[in-house]
Amino acid sequence: MGNKQQLIWDLPPLDSIRVNAAVYGIDAIEAKRRVSELADMLELGEELHRPVRKLSLGQRMKAELLASLLHQPRVLFLDEPTLGLDVSAQARVRDFLAEYNRRFGATVLLTSHYMGDITALCERVLLIHQGQLFHDGDLEALTSKLAPFRQVRLELQRAYPMAAFEAYGTVESHQEHQVMLLINRNCLTETVAALLSNFPVVDLEVNDPPIEELMRSLFSAAATSALP
Amino acid sequence: MTRKRPRLVRAVRIAKALLSTQYAYMLEYRAEIALWAISGVLPLIMLGVWQGSGAATRAGLNPQQLSHYFVAAFVVRQFSVVWLIHVFEEDTLTGKLSPYLLQPLQPLWRYFCAHLAEQATRIPFVGFLLIGLATINPDLLWRPSAGELLWGIAALWSAFILRFLLQTLAAMLCFWSERAAALDRLLLIPYLFLSGLVAPLDTFPASIKRIALATPFPAMVDFPARLLSGLPVDLGGGLLSLLIWCLILAPLCWWGWHQGVRRYGAMGA
């Protein structure tokens, strides 16, 4: 399914769906059952009876998904399925795709510029940059590859000079009681244990750097021909 | 599970679904279709022009035959309008064609059914226009015999298919050019003058008539209009001409489609 609509603009989605059922040779009873099942999953109801032009973008996208999945394809090619949707509509489409994948065992090939889509849905990530395959594997492996460190945020009982933390990793920011460190993944446990025993820590948080930032750094590195 | 259905049953079901859906779609645009129907009155204008001259009489047509011919040409024109190239151009340029390419149905069938649905939507408007003509001048209408009606409708529908094929061939250029619809405007000139829309072919000089008959255009208007209006016509020759032109154009369309679709790649397609 691309970002071009197949539903007829002035008619309710059910009319286009009826044509799809005929085109794919799905009999009327079976088509009705599938529409009902997919409509439940997509939380679509009376929208299927309203002209497409009167639907919101999110409703339209869900109706497009229903029309595209009526014949239960075993492989789905989805090109930017959440493009232009608001946050809650994006979440609903993602939930639906995950559920569809679980229920029907379909292979989903998803192209997206929204990292939210990738983190929520993709077990396997292929990162292609300038025609070259940069990564083929899970998202965690990609994150490790792009950023072999984790972000550790410390909140301390009292202020320490910046130099006190330099032995533990790269100090990303330092503000009196708060310190942000980048620590190598390979020695994360030992380093965090050392920090906890050597400083009066009030709060500690360990995060992966946001995937968007990693991508941005990857692409800017590529622009200066310093691809990792 | 999807059961394998005999091809004919499947084809009938697809045709029914496409025609009913497209008819519903065309009804949404009925006001626009009414205006299109009114804009197709060129043959009636030409009737007014020709009635005042003696050229038709010199060509062997009496005033009644002349008026019946142009009214029949008006009906033929109404039900053989083809606008494929304009929507196809938009669909290829914007990538709307892409979802149809993924489906197990040749996309041109969708356009074909849309034309048939548009013709069905046009029937009442054409009926009103004919009633209007009869009100102004009852002699403008006539009652064709069953044979004339039968053969006339068959020729009219074949003329529509021929026009559809010709424009399909031109529309295939949309895969190469962003302004292929301009070709249709170029084709309109020979269509207008050689089809018999502005003048019955009998009024042409013999040399021009010979040239016209060597093209597909007379089969698109002159032949079905003569059949419907009861003018003498070479039935076998006309039907053969329609068949031959369709047989020439259909494989060219097929070839054009397969060449074009290989290089198709609209933005976001």
Image: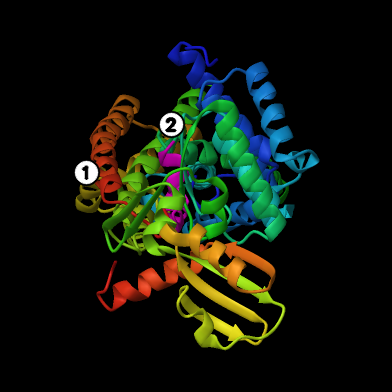
Query: Along the polypeptide, which appears first: circle 1 or circle 2?
Result: 2
- Callout 2, which amino acid? Leu
Q: Position of residue A209 (x, y in %)?
A: 51, 66
- Callout 1, which amino acid? Ala
Left or right of A142, for residue A225? left
Provide the residue span drawn in magenta: B84-102
Question: Which residue is rendered at x = 36% and y = 55% of the image?
Answer: A127
Question: Which residue is rendered at x = 66% and y = 86% of the image?
Answer: A159
B113 up-or-down from B175: above or below: above
Q: Which residue is at the front of the view, B44 or A103?
A: A103
Question: Which residue is rendered at x = 21% and y = 43% of the image?
Answer: B214
Q: Which residue is mark 1?
A: B214
Q: Which residue is mark 2?
A: B105
| Badge 2: residue crowd in 10 Å (few <14, some 14–19, many ≥20) | some
Q: Quadrant of residue A96?
A: top right
Instruction: Give the structural element (helix, strand or loop) at label 2.
Output: loop
B11 up-or-down from B57: above or below: above
Q: Quadrant of the N terminus of chain B?
A: top right
Q: Position of residue A36 (x, y in %)?
A: 72, 28
Q: Which residue is at the front of the view, B125 or B54?
A: B125
Chain ID, mark 1 = B
